[in-house]
Amino acid sequence: MNTTNDTVIDLQNVSFSWPKQTVPTLQMDAFTVQRQDQVFISGPSGSGKSTLLALIGGIVVPQLGTITLLGTELHSISASARDQFRVDHIGFVFQQFNLIPYLSILDNVLLPCQFSKYRRQRALAQGATLRAAAESLLQHLDLAPALWNKPVTQLSIGQQQRVAAARALIGQPEIIVADEPTSALDADRQQGFLDLVQRECAQARSTLLFVSHDQRLSTHFSHQLALNELNHAAHAEA
Ligand SMILES: Nc1ncnc2c1ncn2[C@@H]1O[C@H](COP(=O)(O)OP(=O)(O)OP(=O)(O)O)[C@@H](O)[C@H]1O
């Protein structure tokens, strides 16, 4: 195994089928990602991008092979320990944002700190209070103070997406996973959003996994993963 202390994600000989499926959805020999890497993950619809993210997030475990995140083999810990591991170490940005509509922007950003002592402590190392840490992130993401106490439902799509990014970034998780995060934005805003997320990940030394259909964005990444090439199962179906 060619891993180092800086290996953040390590998949080896993974085979995964969703329940009731007779053929695997994902089969990958090896995939490793190093600390601070920024990886662009692409592939046609159905090639297994969301399945790969579900495996890396420990939401599901493979029938064969190993997935090791930050030195922890996910299949060797319980489902509840995987849930805690996920909130401690991974920040997610989803296409549909998944913000809580009845909470303010600040409370949405602080949500991971409620579920993770680890994230709370890391956020407190960045700001005098949790609120100060959240405010600083919101400022970095170009969300003005006048917005902070508003319900998220009063924000534009682009603003909601930046709140979702701040929630993923609070407490500097080692891994940021962004699943089609820009598909609701126009081309200029896509670019702006990507710049902000890449800059914040670099500052926090977080690893970024960025899934997109939009190949134009791939030029901003040094590490590319074309899933229809790496996933033998997708090959078999093509
Ligand atoms: N929760 C699930 N339960 C059962 N099958 C699933 C589930 N999620 C995905 N699949 C199946 O796994 C295969 C790969 O789907 P996946 O969503 O990972 O692809 P994708 O590359 O993310 O596609 P898209 O770009 O359309 O989102 C598909 O055949 C899909 O039907």
Image (cartoon, grey):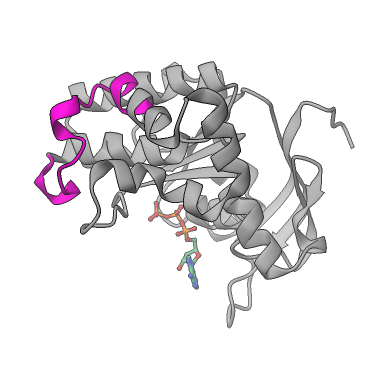
Looking at the image, is 113 positioned above or below residue 22? above
Residue located at (36% from left, 42% from top): 109
**Camera-side residue of 85 and 219:** 85
**Camera-side residue of 225 and 182:** 182
Give the residue at the far right of this rendering.
1
* Residue 149 in picture, x, y percent from top left: 19, 41
Residue 199 occupies quadrant: top left
* Residue 231 in picture, x, y percent from top left: 62, 49
Residue located at (52% from left, 16% from top): 203
**Camera-side residue of 159 and 27:** 159
* Residue 19 in picture, x, y percent from top left: 59, 79
Boundaries of the magenta span: 137-155
Identify the image quadrant of the N terminus: top right
Answer yes or no: is residue 208 visible.
Answer: no
Left or right: where 193 falls relative to 54: left
Residue 51 occupies quadrant: bottom right
- The answer to if 140 sits in the magenta stretch is yes
- The answer to if 138 sits in the magenta stretch is yes
Looking at the image, is 193 positioned above or below residue 88? above
Left or right: where 162 falls relative to 56: left
Give the residue at the far bottom of this rendering.
20
Answer yes or no: is residue 60 visible.
Answer: yes
**Camera-side residue of 156 and 135:** 135
Residue located at (85% from left, 27% from top): 4
Left or right: where 93 falls relative to 150: right
Left or right: where 238 falls relative to 165: right
* Residue 102 in picture, x, y percent from top left: 21, 59
